[in-house]
């Protein structure tokens, strides 16, 4: 990874702060509606090197859809790719992440990919456990393993807020249950999914996960395998094709790295064989991506020549 300095990160983050005025926080989840757009942070975690960061780097945010990458890794390690992709597809979608329309058009009615809500719900449904608590524990345990932190937890208020307002996700679940894509209790599944989305991290912790994916699933310092390389590659491929919702195509042109965003304002990025990057800025564009985060990643990619293309 071309070396980035603290001074560069400070300058670029300061430069993009103004773009927060072009977006708005996610207000359809009551607990997220109170987020402060002026809180912004970035961390670049280099393989075998140091973590350079800037902004409110100790601020904890919920992963939201970034957690879909972790859930996919858990499901793949638990069941293998043949089983996982019998229930969810591999194709990108031009529809919004919450769309139900493609489920009605596809036969069988399985979700197009694991990065849209329907696909992520199907993936979480596959994770083993006698109840939602056991499913969530597996994702928390993987988060602790990847970050090297034993204190990773989820935000109970955000999880409860999402659970109580998850009417569209309930509709997706019931449609998929009708068509045999998911099994068991819809309420148990939503309980697990909303807690998964509410997992808390800061940019330094999230950037380390990016560095592990960049290092083909191995710890960036010890080279110990954390995620099998093949499954890490699958996760990164979905991040390229579907990770930025229905702005993934333009993001591939402007930035050109595997990335996954969440409506909290978090974005996880992967620079192959070089390191991971995480940005946070809760003001979102109309596609649900952090305005500040996307702009900052554009600058970083351009100056540091990150694009895989």
Image (cartoon, helix red, strand yellow):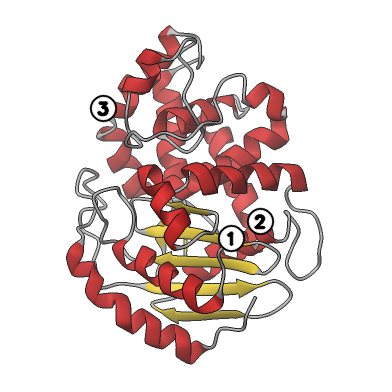
Residue 1 spot, x, y in % from top left:
65, 75
Estimate the x, y position of residue 196 in percent, counting from the top left.
Answer: 47, 42
Answer whether residue 64 is visible to the viewer in this image. Answer: no
Distance CA(mark 2)–CA(mark 1)? 7 Å
Badge number at residue 167:
3
Q: Earlier in the sequence, mark 1 or mark 3?
A: 3
Could you tell me which secondary element the residue under label 2 belongs to? helix
Relative placement, left or right, of 76 versus 287 is: right
Q: Is residue 245 left or right of residue 143?
A: left
Residue plotted at (43% across, 67% down): 279
| Label 2 neighbour load within 10 Å: few <14, some 14-19, many 20+ | many
Distance from label 1 to label 3 (Cα)?
A: 33 Å
Q: Is residue 302 visible?
A: yes
Which residue does the image show at 76% across and 71% down from the upper left? 221
In the figure, 115 relative to 233: above or below? above
Asked whether the beta carbons under mark 2 and mark 1 sit within 8 Å of each other, the answer is yes
Q: Name the residue at 64% across, 33% down.
A: 75
> CB atoms at circles 2 and 3 under 8 Å apart?
no
Crowding near the residue tagged with mark 3, few <14, some 14–19, many ≥20 C-alpha atoms within 10 Å: few
Q: Mark 1: give few (<14), some (14-19) or many (20+) Cα within 10 Å.
A: many
Residue under pointer 1: 270
**Residue at the spot of label 2:** 213
Establish if 246 lies above or below 252.
above
């Amino acid at each position: 990874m071309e070396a980035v300095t603290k001074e560069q990160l400070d300058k670029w983050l300061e430069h993009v702060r103004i773009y927060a005025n072009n977006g708005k926080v996610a207000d359809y989840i009551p607990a997220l509606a109170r987020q402060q757009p002026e809180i912004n942070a970035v961390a670049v975690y280099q393989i075998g090197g140091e973590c350079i960061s800037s902004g409110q780097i100790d601020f904890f945010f919920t992963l939201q859809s970034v957690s879909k990458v972790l859930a996919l890794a858990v499901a793949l390690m638990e069941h293998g790719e043949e089983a996982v992709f019998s229930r969810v597809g591999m194709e990108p979608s031009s529809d919004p992440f919450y769309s139900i329309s493609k489920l009605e058009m596809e036969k069988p009615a399985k979700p197009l990919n694991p990065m849209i809500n329907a696909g992520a719900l199907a993936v979480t449904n596959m994770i083993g456990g006698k109840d939602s608590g056991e499913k969530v524990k597996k994702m928390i345990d993987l988060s602790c393993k990847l970050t090297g932190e034993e204190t990773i937890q989820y935000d109970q208020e955000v999880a409860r807020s999402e659970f109580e307002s998850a009417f569209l996700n309930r509709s997706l679940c019931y449609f998929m249950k009708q068509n045999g894509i998911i099994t068991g209790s819809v309420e148990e599944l939503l309980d697990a999914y909303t807690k998964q989305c509410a997992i808390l991290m800061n940019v330094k912790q999230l950037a380390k996960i990016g560095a592990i994916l960049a290092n083909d699933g191995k710890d960036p310092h010890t080279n110990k395998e954390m995620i099998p390389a093949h499954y890490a590659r699958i996760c990164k491929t979905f991040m390229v094709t579907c990770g930025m919702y229905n702005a993934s195509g333009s993001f591939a042109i402007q930035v050109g790295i595997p990335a996954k965003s969440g409506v909290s304002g978090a974005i996880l990025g992967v620079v192959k064989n070089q390191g991971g990057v995480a940005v946070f800025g809760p003001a979102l564009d109309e596609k649900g991506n952090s305005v500040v985060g996307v702009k900052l990643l554009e600058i970083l990619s351009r100056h540091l020549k990150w694009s895989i293309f």
